[in-house]
Image (tube, helix red, strand yellow):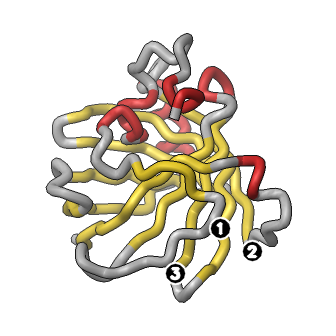
């Protein structure tokens, strides 16, 4: 078990054109349950099963296990419409690794950046391409993104 402590932000895409990302990967993930969150993910031809506790502030418990890719693909099919796809790019800034997710499909246009911290009180310098913090906004939890009325695309108003 690990403690996940992260802050989440919406991104101003117009300010990201000069960034040099260090990696890029396609991620498919689906949700089998929301209480607790049970996620299956395929990334880099590897499968993962993750269980996350409820979020308290910006922290929660996380249990993640690698599973055979074949099992992960079967579990994704069980998720039905509760699957999302995104391109994750990473960049190191100010001693922190930022993960920037570019969502695909019906979530196209949504770009969210996350930074993991060592403690909830850790100070992080925000890059100029950050537009709004959404750490406490449950609409932007990945497990909830699949359930929203995205026809209104609330991130475009942020």
Q: Is residue 81 above or below residue 86?
A: above
Query: Which residue has dot 3 on it?
Result: 96
Earlier in the chain: of badge 3 and badge 1, it is 1
Is there a contact, CB below 8 Å, between mark 2 and mark 1?
yes
Residue 74 rendering spot, x and y as whole percentages: 50, 33
Kindly report the distance in space between the C-alpha atoms of the residues bearing marks 2 and 3: 13 Å
Q: Nearer the viewer, mark 2 or mark 3?
A: 3
Q: Nearer the viewer, residue 33 or 10?
A: 10
Q: Nearer the viewer, mark 3 or mark 1?
A: 3
Q: Residue at x 49, y 33 (%)?
A: 76
Is there a contact, CB below 8 Å, between mark 2 and mark 3?
no
Kindly report the distance in space between the C-alpha atoms of the residues bearing marks 3 and 1: 10 Å
Is there a contact, CB below 8 Å, between mark 3 and mark 1?
no
Q: Nearer the viewer, residue 128 or 110?
A: 128
Query: Which residue has dot 1 on it?
Result: 90
Regarding mark 1 in the picture, which secondary structure is present there?
strand
Q: Nearer the viewer, residue 111 or 75?
A: 111
Regarding mark 3 in the picture, which secondary structure is present there?
strand
Res. 40 image quadrant: top left
Query: Which residue has dot 2 on it?
Result: 22
Residue 24 rendering spot, x and y as whole percentages: 73, 61
Q: Residue at x 27, y 51 (%)?
A: 51
Q: Residue at x 75, y 56 (%)?
A: 15
């Amino acid at each position: 078990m690990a403690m996940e402590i992260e802050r989440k932000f919406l991104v101003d895409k117009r300010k990201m054109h000069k960034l040099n990302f260090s990696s890029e990967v396609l991620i498919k993930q689906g949700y089998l349950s929301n209480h607790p969150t049970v996620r299956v993910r395929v990334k880099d031809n590897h499968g993962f099963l993750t269980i996350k506790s409820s979020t308290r502030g910006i922290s929660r418990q996380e249990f993640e296990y690698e599973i055979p890719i074949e099992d992960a693909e079967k579990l994704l099919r069980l998720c039905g419409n509760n699957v999302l796809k995104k391109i994750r790019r990473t960049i190191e800034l100010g001693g922190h690794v930022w993960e920037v997710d570019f969502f695909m499909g019906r979530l196209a246009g949504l770009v969210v950046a996350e930074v993991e911290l060592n403690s909830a009180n850790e100070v992080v310098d925000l890059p100029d391409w950050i537009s709004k913090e959404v750490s406490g906004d449950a609409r932007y939890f990945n497990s909830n993104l699949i359930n929203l009325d995205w026809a209104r695309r609330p991130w475009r108003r942020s």
